[in-house]
Image (cartoon, rainbow, N blue to C red):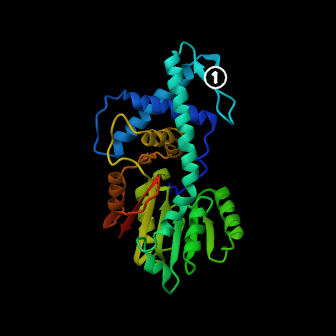
Amino acid sequence: MAPSIHTNRTRRTLAAAGLVLVVAVAVVIAADPFGGSSGSGGGVGDNATATSLATVTRKSLSSQTQVSGTLGYAGSSSIRVPSGTAPSAVSQAEQSVTNAEGMLQTARASLAADSEALAGHRATVHGDVMRDEPPARVADLACGPGWSSIAIARAYPLVSVDGFDLDADAIQAARHNAEEAGLADRVTFAIADASGPAVSGQYDLVTILEGLHDISRPVDALRVARGMLSESGCVIVADELVEDTFTAPASLEEQYHYGWSVVACLPGVMGDPDTAATGAVMRPATLRRYALDAGFRDVEVLPVKAELLRFYRLTP
């Protein structure tokens, strides 16, 4: 089975059921039912925790009895409160919903800035190659609806960008977006998984922006990305800005990412029997291990300021 580069970039919008799971997981993590031990960051410990949280959440939700009291949420029908819930617990749940809504608003507000961050730090991220003649070539893996590809092309008028994603609907939307932006002559899109781009040594830059943790076999995908590079090229990965190591109780931001792991990221890759099951909480040590296993020589955390993302440069 080929490693998938599909990533669901529409997962920023919370449905009511997803919000219930996020709040439930946040409460479970904050209570630290697993003993509050610290790990060495990323990998098996966090994945086991996330899997356990998924089981706890499913059992909790399936065993609840519904009562007339609800916690209202704009755009949803209602969020039911289990019978026998103490007033203090209801108040805590309401506050958790408010916190989740606030983080959603923050995430939406920062989407444009995050998608532009790579292009905005020209000198740091391969800037000279991107500005100079001959025109540079960029491959954007797991491009989704193409906003990152379009942002790069806008910032660097000389480059051409090829976006790849497994989702046919996302690629159709990306092509429409490139047309609307007037960049279809320099930005192209193709439906392909991580083994699909049948090119080698042709790109000055390969990007994987908020997609690596959603790939079932990230080492394989990084190995393919390395093979796509020209002699002087590099890979830029942007992924969730999480803590360097596991801590308990987790911060609100960490709870947010764990919630998305349970709701979307892990379920999306668990169908592959050889999945790495990374999840949204991919710590720097985990990415470094993936990169080294894929044959990269060095991994550098870049000084790019983006509220929800951390940027890495992988050098072959």
Q: Is residue 89 above or below residue 126?
A: above
Residue at the spot of label 1: 70
Viewer can see residue 247: yes
Q: Is residue 247 above or below residue 83?
A: below
Q: Residue at x 32, y 55 (%)?
A: 289
**Horizontal and vertical percent for residue 191?**
61, 63
Judge by depth and name the residue closer to the eye, 54 or 114: 114
Direction bottom: furthest residue: 133
Residue 120 screen position, x and y as percent: 50, 68
On screen, residue 131 versus residue 242, left or right, reads right
Is 135 situated left or right of 243 in this image?
Answer: right
Which amino acid type is shown beneath numbered disc 1?
Answer: Thr
Left or right: residue 92 versus residue 177 is left
Viewer-proximal residue among 266 and 24 = 24
User: Mark 1, residues whose alpha carbon is within 10 Å: few (<14), some, or many (≥20)?
Assistant: some
Residue at 31% from the left image edge and 28% from the top image edge: 35
Q: Residue at x 32, y 45 (%)?
A: 245
The total of numbered circles placed on residues is 1
Q: Quadrant of residue 21?
A: top right
Asked whether residue 8 appears in the rendered view, the answer is no
Disc 1, SS: strand
Q: Position of residue 17 (x, y in %)?
A: 61, 33
The quadrant of the picture occupied by the C terminus is: bottom left
Percent across and percent down for residue 121 are: 46, 69
Residue at 31%, 32% in the rendered image: 36
Q: Nearer the viewer, residue 63 or 284?
A: 284
